[in-house]
Image (tube, rainbow, N blue to C red):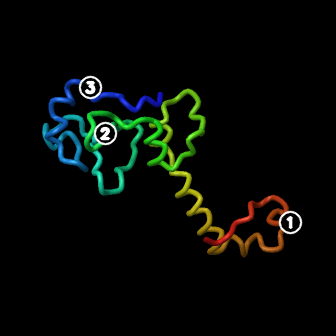
Amino acid sequence: DDDCSVPVVPCDDAVFDQVPPGSNFSCVKPNWRFNSIKLHPNKVPNTIAAGSCLYHYKLHKRLSDRELRLIGSFPMDYNFATKKAQWYIGMSVPPIMTAQISWQIYKNGFRKYVAGNEWQTNNAPQLTEQ
């Protein structure tokens, strides 16, 4: 489902314009739709949770799968199988973050452990410092 025009459900539409960018809908109606968040146009998007609803800051619509993939650093052609993209993205560590953490572990000690080992030279990916 990559429909970029998924509308805000009618009950949200009535309060959409009252919610400041970067805030959740419960700031207008306490204890209501805590995980419904209107993104801020000039700030890093909120963490994508499996059960949250992220909304465009200006358009009355939820973010599309494509937009969620971009925020979560997933490839556009990644196959999420039978679950919705938001569920997988919300339950995962972003791929770019995982790569950076792996590189730091390798760079700060793991390469010493595997230095000279046949496993390193034959099977390990070739990492280059960036």
Q: Secondary structure at mark 3?
A: loop
Locate residue 121 relative to residue 16 in the image: left or right.
Answer: right
Circle 3: residue type = Val
- Mark 3, Cα crowd under 10 Å, few <14 / some 14-19 / many 20+, is few
Q: Secondary structure at mark 1?
A: helix
Distance, label 3 to label 1, CA atoms, is 57 Å
Q: Nearer the viewer, mark 3 or mark 1?
A: 3
Residue of label 1: 118
- The x and y percentages for residue 113 are 73, 72
> Image quarter for residue 18?
top left
Circle 2: residue type = Tyr
Distance, label 1 to label 2, CA atoms, is 50 Å
- The x and y percentages for residue 76 are 56, 41
Locate residue 73 relative to residue 14 in the image: left or right.
Answer: right
Do the numbered discs 1 and 2 sit on residues whose CB atoms are within 8 Å? no
Quadrant (top left/top right/bottom left/bottom right) for the C terminus: bottom right
- The x and y percentages for residue 26 are 18, 40
Residue 7's place in the image compared with 107, above or below, is above
Residue of label 3: 9
Circle 1: residue type = Glu
Going from N to C along the chain, the mark reached first, 3 or 1, is 3
> Image quarter for residue 68?
top left
Locate residue 27 relative to residue 93 in the image: left or right.
Answer: left
Residue of label 2: 55
- Mark 1, Cα crowd under 10 Å, few <14 / some 14-19 / many 20+, is few
Tell me what residue is drawn at x 74 percent, y 60 percent: 125
